[in-house]
Image (cartoon, rainbow, N blue to C red):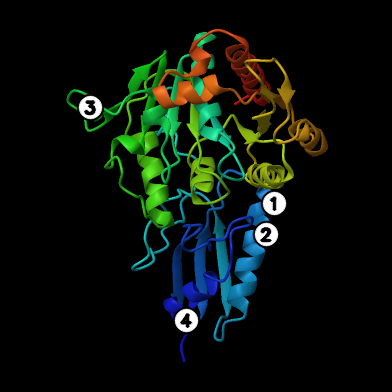
């Protein structure tokens, strides 16, 4: 039986991208696959991360194809244009843009900072919103992108639910602006109480459009509120734009720290600098008696950061004012007091980390 394109694609689907559950075909890492008389040619586009990932992928791709009956030769081209190889019939183009960075997406944005967490419920969006506001108060031209497509929180936390507007004469959305921060979220584009039930390719496409179809203008920093975990959204962002770094949010207890460690490992795998770790809900100070309670433990973020050799960016307390500000659309970083000062210090450390990363 002659070797077929379908058989080759099935074999390639057995190869997973390192650190992720998705295969190299669905992610678009293998492109322009062609089969002719037992000879297989393809382009391997592993993205802008660690070159060792591309080496590993090529080895695994070659091994998977070598096991196919009828394969006489495998030719692999790394990245770039594939020299006229015919496209794969019926294969979708890569929504993750695994072929590399897309400079046209954010032409006027100097630095992109991802705010991420290994698990949900640690206050990642709260940190992202208040970090963005604190950066704006520090004088940086700041944007905020809500890439948490399954649980967009930015509309509520920034205090607006108006429909987005199109730029005059263009098919691009104008970002909203409050507290000196330009921001956009999928939450403005779907029904308020609708559940977003999407597979990976739709998630990747949505994030790409939120990057490229919004008129962000000139920004010093674009803060991206990522979904929790390590998956399609993180991979898409790291392969679409050059990230200045990632801020990892955790709480002090071991169950959160275990997942924060995975988040650090994920960004290292795709060669994104980890700017540091923030311990949210670090302690509770009673507003009545002044007593301090370490409800979730304390110091786990600092110890984990030291063990992973990443900067520790600070402690954010568990305070009613933070929750009230988030629910009311008035971020606490816009006010005064010790909590606002904690976010201001975080913003300065992030700016210093971005400067060190050289992005």
Residues 201 and 313: in front is 313
Mark-to-mark CA distance, 2 and 4: 27 Å
Q: CA distance from mark 3 to mark 4?
A: 54 Å
Say which of 86 and 113 sits in front: 113
Q: As drawn, is 291 to the left or to the right of 246? A: right
Q: Secondary structure at mark 3?
A: strand
For mark 4, does the 10 Å Cα neighbourhood hold few (<14), some (14 to 19), or many (20 or more) residues?
Answer: few
Q: Which-is-in-front pick, marks 3 and 4?
A: 3
Above or below: residue 110 compared with residue 75: above
Is 288 rendered above or below residue 104? Answer: above
Name above or below for residue 248 compared with residue 167: below
Vertical placement of residue 10 versus 187, above or below: below
The residue to which callout 2 is attached is 56
Q: CA distance from mark 2 to mark 1?
A: 6 Å
Mark 1, secondary structure of its residue: helix
Q: Which residue is mark 3?
A: 165
Q: Residue at x 55, y 34 (%)?
A: 124
Which image quarter: residue 251? Answer: top right
- Disc ID at residue 52: 1
Q: CA distance from mark 4 to mark 1?
A: 31 Å
Mark positioned earlier in the residue sequence (2 or 4):
4
Instruction: Bin the neighbour count of mark 1 within 10 Å (Cα to Cα): few under 14, some 14-19, many 20 and up.
Output: few
Q: Are marks 2 and 1 in contact (CB under 8 Å)?
A: yes
Q: Please tell me the numbered disc located at residue 194.
A: none
> Considering only order in the chain, which callout, 4 or 3, is on the residue closer to the N terminus?
4
> Of label 2 and label 3, which has the lower sequence position?
2
Marks 1,3: beta carbons within 8 A: no
Q: Which mark is residue 37?
A: 4
């Amino acid at each position: 039986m002659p070797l077929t394109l379908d058989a080759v694609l099935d074999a390639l689907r057995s190869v997973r991208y390192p650190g992720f559950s998705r295969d190299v075909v669905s992610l678009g890492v293998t492109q322009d696959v062609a089969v002719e008389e037992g000879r297989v040619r393809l382009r391997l586009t592993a993205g802008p991360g660690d070159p060792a990932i591309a080496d590993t992928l090529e080895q695994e791709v070659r091994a998977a194809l070598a096991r196919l009956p009828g394969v006489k030769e495998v030719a692999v081209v790394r990245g770039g244009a594939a020299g006229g190889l015919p496209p794969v019939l019926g294969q979708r183009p890569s929504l993750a843009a695994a072929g590399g960075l897309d400079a046209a997406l954010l032409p006027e944005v100097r630095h992109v900072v991802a705010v991420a967490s290994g698990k949900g419920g640690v206050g990642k969006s709260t940190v992202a919103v208040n970090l963005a506001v604190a950066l704006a108060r520090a004088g940086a031209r700041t944007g905020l992108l809500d890439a948490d497509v399954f649980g967009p929180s930015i509309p509520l936390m920034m205090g607006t639910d108006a429909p987005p507007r199109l730029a005059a004469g263009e098919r691009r959305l104008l970002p909203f602006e409050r507290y000196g921060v330009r921001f956009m979220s999928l939450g403005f584009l779907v029904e308020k109480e609708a559940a977003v039930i999407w597979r990976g390719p739709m998630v990747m496409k949505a994030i790409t459009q939120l990057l490229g179809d919004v008129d962000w203008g000139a920004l010093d920093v674009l803060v991206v509120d990522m979904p929790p975990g390590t998956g399609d959204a993180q991979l898409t962002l790291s392969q679409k734009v050059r990230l200045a770094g990632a801020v990892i949010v955790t709480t002090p207890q071991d169950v959160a720290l275990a997942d924060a460690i995975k988040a650090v490992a994920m960004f290292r795998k795709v060669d994104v600098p980890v700017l540091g770790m923030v311990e949210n809900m670090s302690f509770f100070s009673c507003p009545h008696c002044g007593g301090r309670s370490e409800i979730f433990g304390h110091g786990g973020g600092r110890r984990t950061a030291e063990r992973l050799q990443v900067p520790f960016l600070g402690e954010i307390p568990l305070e009613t004012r933070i929750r009230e500000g988030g629910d009311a659309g008035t971020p606490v970083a816009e006010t005064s007091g010790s909590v606002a000062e904690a976010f201001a210090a975080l913003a300065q450390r992030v700016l210093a980390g971005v400067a060190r990363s050289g992005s």
